[in-house]
Image (tube, rainbow, N blue to C red):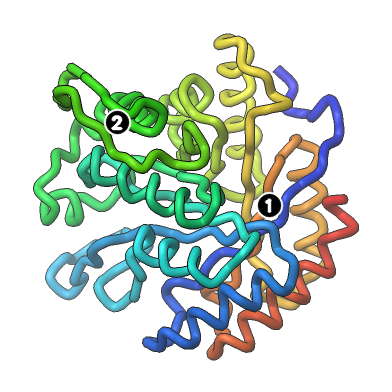
Amino acid sequence: MSTRNTSPRSIRLGAVVPQTELPPDAGAARHWFAQVEQLRFDHALIYDHVLGADTSVRPGWSGAYEATDPFLEVMVALAWAAGFTERLELATGVVILPQRQTALVAKQAATIDHLSGGRLRLGVGIGWNKVEYDALNEQFNNRGKRLEEQIALMRRLWTEPVVTFEGEWHHVDHAGILPLPVQRPIPVWIGASADVAIRRAARLADGFYPQGVPSEKMEHMLAVLFEALERHERDRETFGIEARITVSTDDEAEWRRQAAWWREKGITHLSLNTMRGGLTSIEAHLEAFSRGREALLQEIG
């Protein structure tokens, strides 16, 4: 199946919260969210990790993050940001759902959506960090299957005042999470790179976060996605896809090339990332976001 988009559509532009490079200063984080909204970004996307592993006792560690990388807790951070932003969509990219209690995440998400006036987009995934699963007392090996049941339960909790649910891992006996969210249900997106997880996103989710950059591997991932969307009779015009481009370098030609590639594939959202580029202050990150936004607006329409 071709991965080329058949009809152009507007692309929403977002900014990735520079989690690992935020100073330990609430004022700096508040300034970042406020300025991103002022720069007219459509959404803020935040990465999730609860615990970082100490790599000094783990020879051969290959994870992307470790104990020295700071992370704000995503649901708390977005609830806080909802209080001083007005129009910015608040997106998780992604909450590692199977390492968390399902009803509690549903309640947290409903509260953020309620207090923000319907501005939450809940991206979820299964993650890779077994250290976190062990510490949170959740099973690592069945996380994909549990994710599916979690999504089903959350959607019911978001749309019904009282729920009875009998699943393999979840039991709810005539209970609910009032107040319900503004969005009923809250949009659920899945981030993934493995074929089985991509097919899960096509079958269950409202959108997909492809994990990677333009490449032959990404061509394959998108082909798997589009084939699965067709098989499950999902409408590609209403199914979201969000890509990311790193703009912490000075290679604007490469940013434009990637944006044009993604646009051809039919993405609906594009977020700019400024981490791991040597930026040393919030103002430097914000300057990179502003420069990246201006450079890419013509490419994404």
Q: Is residue 77 left or right of residue 118?
A: left
In the picture, measured across the screen, residue 28 lies left or right of residue 134, that is right
Where residue 150 is drawn, which disc sits there? 2
Q: Which residue is mark 1?
A: 270
Front position in the image: 241 or 105: 105
Labels 1 & 2 near each other (Cβ < 8 A): no
Give the class, few, some or many, for how many residues have Cα within 10 Å of label 1's Cα (few <14, many ≥20): many
Q: Amino acid at mark 2?
A: Gln
Viewer-proximal residue, 230 or 111?
Answer: 111
Q: Is residue 89 above or below residue 248?
A: above
Mark 1 lies on a secondary structure that is strand
- Residue 285 vertical position relative to residue 232 in the rendered view, above or below: below
Q: Is 257 above or below relative to 72?
A: above
Residue at 72% from the left image edge and 50% from the top image edge? 12
Q: Which residue type does callout 1 highlight?
A: Leu
> Which is more N-terminal, label 2 or label 1?
2
